[in-house]
Image (cartoon, rainbow, N blue to C red):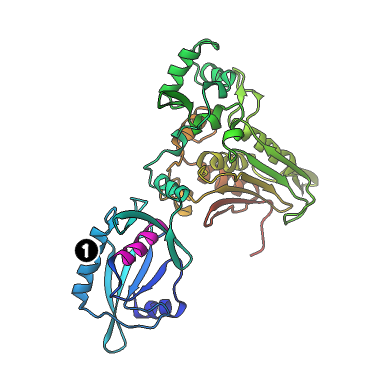
Amino acid sequence: MTGTELYEILRNGENSGVEFKRDDVYPDSLAKEIAALANLEGGRILLGVEDDGSVSGLTRTAKDAEAWVMNVCRDHLQSPLIPYWETLPYGTIQQIGVISIPADCPDKPYKAKRGSAWVSFLRVGSTSREATRDEEARLYQSSGLVRYDLRPVPGTTLQHLDRDLLENYFYTILQQDCPPIEDDDAWTRLLLNIDILVADRGRVISTIGGLLLFGENPTRYLPQSGITATAYPGQDKEYATVDEDLIRGPLVSSRSRRGRITEPGVIDRAVDFAARNMGTTAWLEKGRQRRKKGYALEAVREAIVNAVAHRDYTIAVTDIELSLYSDRLEVISPGRLPNSVTVEKMKQGYRAARNELLKEILRDYGYVEHRGMGVRNRIIAGMREHNGTEPDLIEEESRFIVRLWKEKREK
């Protein structure tokens, strides 16, 4: 960090990535701030700075301060973390210690010692607070320590899965044998082996992934499992709509041997909604009028598939949103990007799934691109070829947005 950067940080004050601390702070208090920043997107703690941004400076030598910080990170954090430490001069005699926590800390959730307990903390604005149970579950999931789509859904059994759809999956999609439709024991053994069912304290229960893919009524147990689709007449959300649909049911479609959809699932129903509401663009070419759909259909499909495959299903009672406006189409997926994925990595074809079971079975159906290049090849390249526009890929605090444009915009 340069002196100019230091003065700029001091002038702007604390925020979601910056914390000020005196250097006589209690170890547990410092560990709390380090854990909270590591559980978000990293950041800096300026040691020797008051809450109001005034500089009190280090009261110990830089070497002693560094050793103390490293001891705190080793003894008061789970998992231990080694931050980057540097000392910067301030004025003529004072020094400030800077603790830098990287953005992609791999062992989330980081817990700080509080008395005899270990507690997960999160950074919210300029403060750090204890994570809720759901927030802590998302931290475990983001580090790949927990497969959320393999968790059991209490109250469900084999009977809550659509046996005809499962039979269609094995016979038609995988082209392999499966048990007779009425043989519960054989179906149970088969589905336990592929994580559609899970044994839990003597009972056989559907997993979250199994219910999302093949459930007869997934939203009864997983209210967040659908897509809210809305078409608006203008460029903003309005009470008046052109078309709307609450799309519910299993994610996948039933198909004939030739691949024709016989009973559409959530993904194909959402694509159909977009197709009938996206309109067309028209132009003259050598005196003849030409028309094409408002968006590349493969780009729309890829955005929808990515949303259902990679959304954070720990965020309850929040649908995926599919919204069409007069100038754009948006797919909004609850939750941040998974497992250290960034927008730039997505553009290059980086692959990291939040829900492995969903991804693998959607790949069997052909929804998911085998090489993991769907964003680059279908969304970005597809829209460039279709109308020369650049899609927007936007990560916000609790959601991810794919925005497709109907026409080029003036810069």
Quarter placement of the C terminus: bottom right
Query: Looking at the picture, how far across and down is residue 140, in whole percent?
Result: 39, 46
Query: Looking at the picture, how far across and down is residue 176, in whole percent?
Result: 48, 15
Viewer-closest of 191 and 251: 191
Q: Which range of residues does the magenta coloring cover?
A: 28-40
Image side of residue 248 versus residue 77, left or right = right
In magenta segment, residue 89: no
Q: Find disc 1 in the rendering and name its residue.
A: 71
Q: Amino acid at mark 1?
A: Asn
Label 1 sits on a secondary structure element that is: helix
- Write the residue at 50% across / 42% down: 310
In magenta segment, residue 39: yes
Q: Is residue 323 above or below residue 49?
A: above
- Write the residue at 52% across / 10% down: 180
Count of numbered tags: 1
- Looking at the image, the residue that sits furthest to the front is 116
Query: Looking at the picture, how far across and down is residue 217, in whole percent?
Result: 61, 29
